[in-house]
Amino acid sequence: MTKPPIRLLVVDDSAYNRRNIADVFATYPEVEVVGKAADGEEALRLAALLKPDVITLDLEMPRMDGFTFLRILMSRQPTPVIVVSSYSQKENVFKALELGALDFVAKPTAQISPDATDLREQILAKVLLVRQLRSNLTPPAPSSRRQVSGNFSVDGRNGFADSTAMRAASAYIAPKHVIAIASSTGGPSALLEIFSKIPLTSTAGIVVAQHMPDKFTRTFAERLDKRGAVRTSEAVEGDRVGKLTGFVCPGRQCMEVMQNGLELKLAISPPRPDDRYVPSADRLLKSVAAACGAKAVGVILTGMGDDGVEGARAIRDAGGLVIAESQETAVVYGMPGAAVRAGIPQKELPLPQIAEFLATL
């Protein structure tokens, strides 16, 4: 039986952008543009009236901006939202993801050109992704400043404001475990939850392959750094993976962990022809398996496709532990589901339990 089309509401204060986004779907019967709104107030009225399956959202709008719209929408009728934002608004994108937006598309300029083929294909792919979402999609709990231990808070003050100085002053301590995390769609919010629960007493190091554009990974790493006790940054060649350190693979690059004497160091390199995804979770997890053996922990979070499955297999074969996010909480069950179907993970847990388990390592 033919499925009904995905009902899309386009929200952007630019009539030019609204028209060009709608035109993306003109030749795709799988998607029906049911409405267009120029600001958050109009978008809320249309969302209540039209009950769209997905919304594309500009964040900077008059009368009611995208953040206010997201807060109200997610409290009234949680709906998948794809943020369409410029490269210059990186912090705003992650704020929107924390408020419940599903994913984002980065536009190079304020205006979406009709011949911006790559951008139009990204918008199409992310809207079509709605069919793969779990049906009980709900927004994440609002983030707030959390206490980790003693006088350390995670809002960038009382201990974490000087994270760079802490890095420089602290001696290298090899981690007892290396946690390698693979994630894609829905991953940023999941990673923020995990990093917020890792305590100062943790002896693990964390490396992350999150599918994300290159101009956003540094900002995302900085956001993770402020969220908890793990000293997190965008990885650079030669970084040492130590106790309570975290590294996000730079966009459009691949990252591997290498044994270097008594230290674990990072190697950053361009993708190879056989890398189906970039950053490649498979490459990262395979390298952690080779370098760490039984001390490796592989975690496959929400995302499309099957990136990380072969890397997870390598970790299990090396005597390490593999955890997959359960369908109960995975926004998109593609990556963890592929690992589960292959019979690789020793544990399949909902996201809160993954975070709690990793906090005990």
Image (cartoon, grey):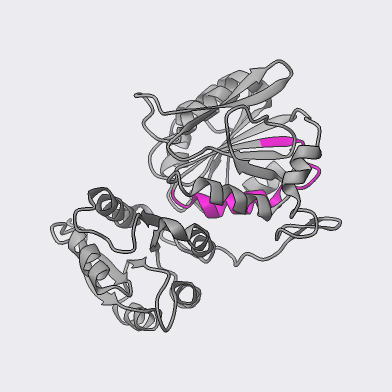
Q: At 39% across and 83% down in the image, what residue appears? A: 41
Whole-percent x, y for residue 29 in the image: 15, 59
In this view, 152 is above or below 68: above
Magenta residues (range): 185-205
Classify residue 3 by image quadrant. bottom left
Tell whether 255 sits left or right of 6: right
Q: Quadrant of the N terminus?
A: bottom left
Tell whether 206 sits left or right of 174: left
Q: Residue furthest right?
A: 150
Q: Is residue 191 magenta?
A: yes
Residue 318 visible: no
Q: At 61% across and 21% down in the image, what residue appears? A: 258
In this view, 338 is above or below 193: above
In this view, 172 is above or below 196: above
Q: At 60% across and 67% down in the image, what residue appears? A: 142
Q: Quadrant of the C terminus?
A: top right
In this view, 230 is above or below 143: above
Whole-percent x, y for residue 176 in the image: 75, 29
Tell whether 221 sits left or right of 337: right
